[in-house]
Amino acid sequence: MLKLYAMFLTLIFLVELVAAIVGFVFRHEIKNSFKNNYEKALKQYNSTGDYRSNAVDKIQNTLHCCGVTDYRDWTDTNYYAEKGFPKSCCKLEDCTPQRDADKVNSEGCFIKVMTIIESEMGVVAGISFGVACFQDIFREVAFS
């Protein structure tokens, strides 16, 4: 039973190691995928509250940004043609930006999201490495 547990811990360690390597190797594809999905979410944005629209609103409200690269990304959407900018683009609370670019955040969300992810990557990698090493050391000590 102990050998089975040791093999299970080793398997978990290897899965964590492979996940870290794959994440590092494919980080550019992850960025491109996020950007493409965010652009798609903007194109399909509506105010009825579907999960993609809610995610766009949450990102724009939290990070004080608008659009993918900048606020002009919204001008190519059906939502903008009908209603203008969404309220989540507003610089101030309780504004109704409609088509007034002076009332919306000018910076795009993609750069802000990537900056946050990259700045936190060291913390995530450090914690993951620590957990993985602890598991491996525990396995070695407990089953030697």
Image (spheres, rainbow, N blue to C red):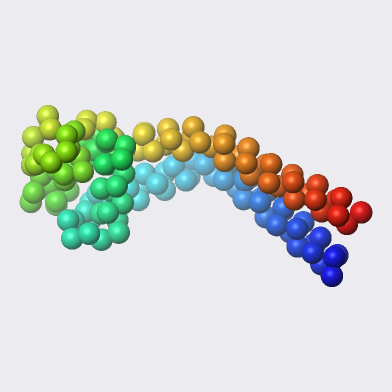
* Residue 143 to residue 98: above or below: below
Q: Residue at position x 52%, y 41% from top?
A: 27
What is the x, y in percent for residue 6? 81, 60
Determine whether, in the image, residue 119 is placed left or right of residue 38: right
Toward which corner of the image does residue 93 lie, by quadrant? top left
Determine whether, in the image, residue 91 is placed left or right of residue 129: left
Q: Residue at position x 46%, y 38% from top?
A: 117
Residue 40 in view of the camera: no
* Residue 119 to residue 129: above or below: above
For the view shown, which residue lies furthest in the bottom direction?
1
Residue 66 in view of the camera: yes
What is the x, y in percent for residue 18? 66, 50
| Quarter of the image where the N terminus is located | bottom right
Determine whether, in the image, residue 106 is placed left or right of residue 127: left
What is the x, y in percent for residue 38? 32, 47
Mark count: 0
| Quarter of the image where the C terminus is located | bottom right
Q: Residue at position x 10%, y 44% from top?
A: 84
What is the x, y in percent for residue 76? 17, 44
Q: Residue at position x 49%, y 40% from top?
A: 28
Q: Nearer the viewer, residue 38 or 48?
A: 48
